[in-house]
Amino acid sequence: MSPPLSLPLLAALTPSDVDVRLIDENVERVDVNTPADWVAMTCMTASAPRAYELADGFRKRGVPVVVGGIHPSVMPDEASARTDAVAIGEAEPVWRTIIEDLAAGRLRPRYDSSGWADLTGLPIPRRDLLRADRYVTLNVVQTARGCPHGCSFCSVTPVFGRKYRFRPIPEVVDEVRSLSGWIGFVDDNICGHPGRGKELFEALIPLKIKWVGQGDLSLARDPELLALAARSGCQAMFMGLESVSQENLRATGKSVNLRGDMGEAIGKIHRAGIEIIGSFVLGLDGDDTSVFDRTVDFAKRHKLLAAQFAVLTPFPGTVIRRELEEEGRIGDHDWARYTMSNVVFRPKQMTAAELTIGQGRAYGRFYSIPSILRRSLTLRGRLLPKLVVNLSYRGVRRGSGVSKAIGAFWKRWRPAGAQPPLPAQVATTADSSSK
């Protein structure tokens, strides 16, 4: 488990005379009786019901509540009904105004960021406010926002846009230099702009770090970019492979995966020494019940370090939700079930039960002990981190949780002085109260 980054960053932008406490409900529960003058929360869709529940508790005590994040940004009317104010879009441009209005008792119902946040001169996030003992690492860093791909099922571009916006590389380097151990870059696509990627990777090489990030298969098509990523210390990339069907890739707008053979691209990245955690979406309109075995066979054949098999989830603000709503195919509006493991719509070529069972079978086959060993025992090495990541995913699917799975394994098997790798799965639901 690694921490959220948004609230530590906003805490760093908060005036020093404000006493801030940050609580991440992934690692500790929020007590609505906690003394606070006001509360700010961020949430994604699946955590929105819990955020509203907490808001109700604080507001009953007369504590003003401000909410922001992806879900409130695309569902501001809903969020406004349960909170005192909603920050729509990126919070940095309006954060100081929100704090001033809270202090003056003139809080407005909405604060809508006009345009995008300026990523120049951002402070170092307040990692000191996090419970360091509850995370595998605190070393998460953002270098850019936005993604050029407009995938129909993704909620990133409706909120952060398709145009890349970059932090100055010297500022990124200074932040990385202040940290020790593995680094996790949380950009949605760190290699999607080749020119900037090359410049960033070159600047990271002298730091001699090891890092993981998120990218796409375009990395394989630029030999210089790939080589620089490897030299800069890239150990693994989380990549949205999405589907083994070209029909599905075209329908969802994932054009980058149509430019050449996906298996060949994966092989090039592996030969450069970079592992891939692949993400697949199950239940797209082109999928029938054969998709589960075909997807797992692909992931095993190409020896992915790990894989996520997500049920198609029509998140608010996405193109796919609008399409499914127009077709009357969304049957479940309980946001708490929008976890990418529950079927909340009517699939086209299978039943909801078949999709649920198929997802479970995909995880079961891919994370069986024989599959883990065959994929981990490769010439690329790094056996211990591979086992840790795979066993963490296996633990999550079996209900033991990622933190327990990683912690128990690492406690028993870690080499002297070694640090654990970044976790296999990151989920952020954070709540902050300031007094």
Image: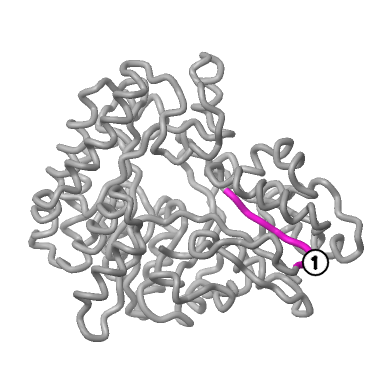
Q: Residue at x 76, y 39 (%)?
A: 81
Q: Colour scheme used in the picture?
A: one colour
Pick out the residue farthest to the bottom.
417
**Residue 127 magenta-drawn?**
no
Image height check: is 17 above or below 364?
below
Count residues near mark 1 (Cα–Cα under 10 Å), then give few for <14, some for 14-19, many for 20+: some
Magenta residue span: 36-43
Provide residue 37's location: percent of width, then percent of height: 80, 66
**Residue 42 magenta-drawn?**
yes
Image height check: is 69 above or below 322?
below
Q: Residue at x 66, y 72 (%)?
A: 21
**10 on left or right of 183:** right
Q: Residue at x 58, y 59 (%)?
A: 430
Snapshot quadrant of residue 300: top left
Q: Quadrant of the C terminus?
A: bottom right
Evaluate whether residue 135 shows in this view. Answer: yes
Question: Please, what is the three-letter code of the amino acid marked with disc 1?
Answer: Asp
Q: Main secondary structure of the magenta part?
A: strand
Q: Quadrant of the N terminus?
A: bottom left
Evaluate whether residue 241 shows in this view. Answer: no
Snapshot quadrant of residue 379: bottom left
Provide residue 226's location: percent of width, then percent of height: 28, 58
Q: Residue at x 31, y 40 (%)?
A: 309
Image height check: is 385 above or below 217?
below
Say what secondary structure mark 1 lies in: loop
Provide residue 240's location: percent of width, then percent of height: 35, 43
